[in-house]
Amino acid sequence: MSSPALDALDRTRTVIVLTVSPLEEHGPHLPLGVDAIAARHFAESIAARLVAARPGWTVVLAPTLHLGSFTFDAPGTVSVRQRVVRDALVDYGVSLARAGFRYILVANGHAGPGHLAALDEAAATVSRRYGISMASFTGHLAWQFLRGRYLDKIGAALGRPLSDAERQAFAEDAHGGWWETSLMLLVRPDLVDGAYRTLPPARYPLAARVLPNYPLRNGGLGYVGHPALADPDFARATTEVLIAETM
């Protein structure tokens, strides 16, 4: 989109969606761009829902920013300091606010605590300074999801309740496991190594999860959870629930 084309948009009926997620290892079976791919998928899904729900509105998907903090360190991971993520997003938001845009959403596929805090702080800062609505909608959603708060709704979307074994597996899942491998099978199956089917569960107690780089310690392969359970139908149902919770 050119500058004149962007400038021609009605500021009262335009939403800009920024996608911000890091490049990070996700085990031997998934690409470095999992978080950014997931965030882009959510951004596109939200955009489609907004356009359908609000005739006459325009949603602009900005290019993805491959920035993120609180990542697992391995070849290919690009870790950015938390304040740099925050400041970069503030600068993006300020530029859009100065151009007159009033509605900015931040899509994200990375659940690192410091990363989520950086996005929330940036959105709040820009909103306060310029009197606009800038929101990072994935922080609260991510934590509720990871805590299992949406499992009943996901089961309903699947058309069957999740078994006790599946609920336990979900509780053990966190990074490059059942959920993220399922999502990649749904969105970009060409980027998933078929070896995921043979990967054993990687279980880590809470005490281990507070250690830096814990999935890669002591011979760990960089994932947490149950990638072998991956199923695109699970990702489809989960995405449906998360989009509904966002809207």
Image (cartoon, rainbow, N blue to C red):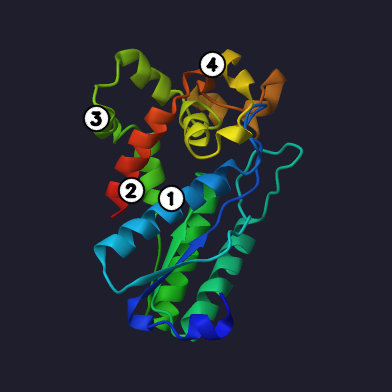
Marking on residue 201: 4
Q: Residue at x 33, y 32 (%)?
A: 148
Where does label 1 land, which residue?
42
Marking on residue 243: 2
Alpha carbon distance from label 1 to label 2: 7 Å
Q: Residue at x 36, y 57 (%)?
A: 48
Q: Position of residue 188 (x, y in %)?
A: 55, 38
In primary-sequence order, the first of circles 4 and 2 is 4
In primary-sequence order, the first of circles 1 and 2 is 1
Q: Quadrant of residue 4?
A: bottom right
Circles 1, 2 touching at the beta carbon (< 8 Å) = yes
Crowd around label 4: few <14 · some 14–19 · many ≥20 (10 Å): some
Q: Nearer the viewer, residue 144 or 207?
A: 144
Alpha carbon distance from label 1 to label 4: 27 Å
Type of amino acid at the residue the image marks with label 1: Phe
Q: Nearer the viewer, residue 123 or 105?
A: 105
Where does label 3 land, which residue?
152
Vertical arrangement, residue 38 with respect to residue 98, above or below? above
